[in-house]
Amino acid sequence: MCPERVEIPARRDDASLPLPAYARAGDAGLDLRAAQPLTLEPGERGVVPTGLRLAIPEGHAGLILPRSGLALKHGITVLNAPGLIDAGYRGEIQVLLIN
């Protein structure tokens, strides 16, 4: 259990986009969603926009990690895993994927 809870302000480029959410109680990480559909052919790479901007507090960082289910079932993974989101970055979170 984490001794401190860190609040991370988030802003969506489109209010209809869902905020990151835990899939199940007790999960360690939040699930990100793509802001728009994207098809990657086998071996193809792509940048997936999330429409999400975070204000991570100084001294903290965000990590984008691959999902084992996507890799096992579909061969899709995060190319630069783990993707690092520095505290000072305020642009749109984008995920670099490879199929």
Image (spheres, rainbow, N blue to C red):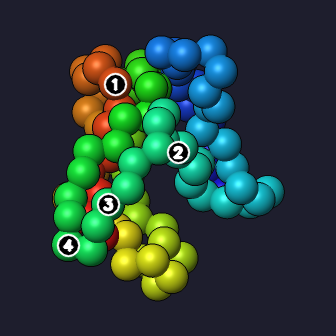
Disc 4: which residue: 43
Name the element at disc 3: loop
Residue closer to the observer: 31 or 17:
17
Decide which of tag 1 and tag 2 comes sooner along the chain. 2
Where residue 62 appears, x then y in whole percent?
Answer: 38, 41
Q: Earlier in the sequence, mark 3 or mark 1?
A: 3
Left/right placement of residue 49 relative to residue 19 reads: left
Of badges 3 and 2, the one in the foreground is: 3
State which mark lies toward you, 4 or 2: 4
Marks 4 & 2, CB-CB < 8 Å contact = no
Residue placed at 46% from the left, 26% from the top?
52
Q: Are marks 1 and 2 in contact (CB under 8 Å)?
A: no
The picture places residue 51, in percent across and down from the top left corner, at: 44, 26
Mark 3 and mark 2 residues within 8 Å of each other at the beta carbon: no
Q: Residues within 10 Å of mark 4 (few under 14, many from 20)?
A: few
Q: Residues within 10 Å of mark 2 (few under 14, many from 20)?
A: some
Residue behind mark 3: 40
Instruction: Please give the residue where the numbered disc 2 appears in the rendered image.
Output: 32
92 relative to 45 in the view: left or right: right
- Name the mark nearer the viewer: 3 or 1: 3
**Amino acid carrying mark 3 in the image:** Leu
- Which residue position holds label 1? 92
